[in-house]
Image (cartoon, grey):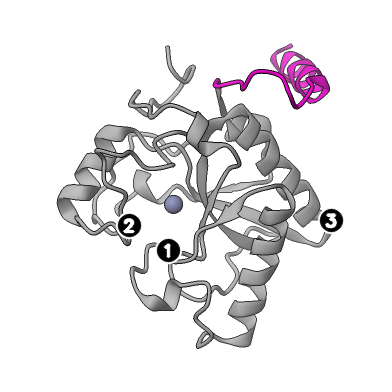
Amino acid sequence: MKKSIVAFCLFFLVQVPVSAARDIDFVDIGELDRSIVLDIRYATPNNFTGQAVYPAARCLLRRDAALRLLRVQEKLAEKGYRLVVFDCYRPLSVQKRFWEILPDERYVADPSKGSRHNRGAAVDVSLADSAGRLLAMPTGYDDFSEKAHRDWKGASPEALKNSAILETAMKAEGFEPFPAEWWHFDAPGWEEYPVSDFPMKKTGGCED
Ligand SMILES: [Zn+2]
């Protein structure tokens, strides 16, 4: 029953004209798609803080950004790839913790301005094969060095090729690549969404 409601909602949404008022609802990628690999690093100690800062490994996004990401996954699947998601919505309170650890705007957005992740309109992604195994990329996630920059050509040909496949697929659905991080993409219209700070819960709805 729940699945059919989701399917109906999705059907309805794709019929909405582009000019309609922006829908600011959050949706859960894990509920809409099982083929995207959720590797939510901030729900584990495997991130630059060394601590699990989310209580749940969920990818929450504004609905328009989520639907775009699903289309990216659909197209990548046709070529034998799967999207891997490292981070989506990030509560502002978590952004403040990041800023205390690394107050450098080249790598962490100043919480007084808010990160695009705080708006639920940015994703950190990578690429896996059809079995979900991570493919080579120029660096690991959250490598705060010039090796993660999109114009850095020192990576292996394999890593550069994979990064280019990911970037091309994301751009085709309107995502904007961030020059200093091969994994970060902003959803179109990110600036129209408010900064949010509801906690990342294990289950249930997004903002209630
Ligand atoms: Zn990011």
Q: Residue at x 64, y 82 (%)?
A: 158
- Residue range in magenta is 1-25
The answer to whether mark 2 and mark 1 are in CB contact below 8 A is yes
Q: Residue at x 63, y 62 (%)?
A: 128
Q: Earlier in the sequence, mark 2 or mark 3?
A: 2
Image quadrant in which the C terminus is located:
top left
Secondary structure at numbered mark 2? loop
Q: Is mark 2 within 8 Å of ligand 1?
A: no
Give the CA separation, mark 2 to mark 3.
31 Å
| Rendering coords of residue 178 (x, y %) | 50, 59
Residue beneath disc 1: 141
Residue beneath disc 2: 47
| Rendering coords of residue 51 (x, y %) | 24, 50
Q: Within 10 Å of the Cα at label 1, are there few (<14), some (14-19), or many (20+) other Cα atoms? A: many
| Three-letter code, disc 2 | Asn
Q: Is mark 3 within 8 Å of ligand 1?
A: no
| Three-letter code, disc 3 | Glu
- Confirm whether residue 176 shows in the render: yes
| Rendering coords of residue 185 (x, y %) | 54, 52
Q: Nearer the viewer, residue 103 or 101?
A: 103
Q: Within 10 Å of the Cα at label 3, are there few (<14), some (14-19), or many (20+) other Cα atoms? A: few
Secondary structure at numbered mark 3? helix
Residue beneath disc 3: 78
Q: Is residue 193 found inside the magenta-colored segment of the image?
A: no
Looking at the image, is 208 positioned above or below residue 197? above
| Three-letter code, disc 1 | Tyr
Secondary structure at numbered mark 1? loop
Q: Residue at x 28, y 59 (%)?
A: 48
The answer to whether mark 1 and mark 3 are in CB contact below 8 A is no
